[in-house]
Image: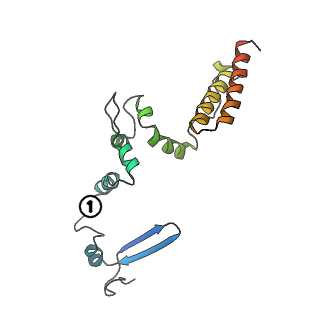
Amino acid sequence: MLCQKCKKKQATVHMTDIAGKDKKEVHLCENCAQNQGLTLKGQVSLADFLAGLIKAPVNQEMSRLAKLECPECGINYIEFQSKGRFGCPKDYDVFEKLVDPLIEKIHGANEHVGKAPEAHGDGAEAHLVALKRHLKAAIEEERYEEAARIRDDIKKAEDKTSGTE
């Protein structure tokens, strides 16, 4: 395929720009790509390339979150990404907004949905914890009617576990 700009040399740089439903493909030779600032002279390592992607803010919120640092252990989100593990238990709270989508993508959910340990018996305590979590989410999302229903369910579940039903 020939370069779309000079129409003389073989196209070696191929870019696809997708904006919504529009897809635009550009095929350029190395010289034309360099002239348009699409490539760098010399070689760039994969690590440098990825570091550049991390430093380039996608939006202000992600940029702000990426600068977060744990007050306990001092790790920041970029260090977590490079090491692949957190420095302390507090990190899960500090980086929650960044890690939740990652966990959901890997496991398909953000909360454990498997079997409860046998120590929980019939799972009443686990059910109560789940109800409280749903209540908190409903309140935060301003779904007050649902929150009232969940509150009533929590009251019934607490009465049932305490034996005052």
Q: Where 53 sits versus 18, above or below?
A: above
| Label 1 environment density (alpha carbons within 10 Å; few <14, some 14–19, many ≥20) | few
Q: Residue furthest left?
A: 42
Q: As drawn, is 29 to the left or to the right of 139?
A: left
Q: Which residue is mark 1?
A: 44
Decide: is 37 above or below 4: above
- The number of discs equals 1
Residue at image location 54% in from the left, 43% down from the top: 104
Q: Nearer the viewer, residue 159 or 13?
A: 159
Residue 7, percent across and down?
A: 34, 87
Q: Secondary structure at mark 1?
A: loop
Residue for point 43% across, 69% down: 17
Which is nearer the eye, 151 or 51?
Answer: 151
Residue at the bottom extreme of this rendering: 8
Residue 120 lies in quadrant: top right
Q: Residue 119 appears at what percent x and percent y?
A: 64, 18
- Report the colour scheme: rainbow
Q: Is residue 48 above or below residue 110?
A: below
- Looking at the figure, which quarter contains the C terminus? top right
Percent of width and height locating residue 74 = 31, 32
Residue sitting farthest toward the right: 165
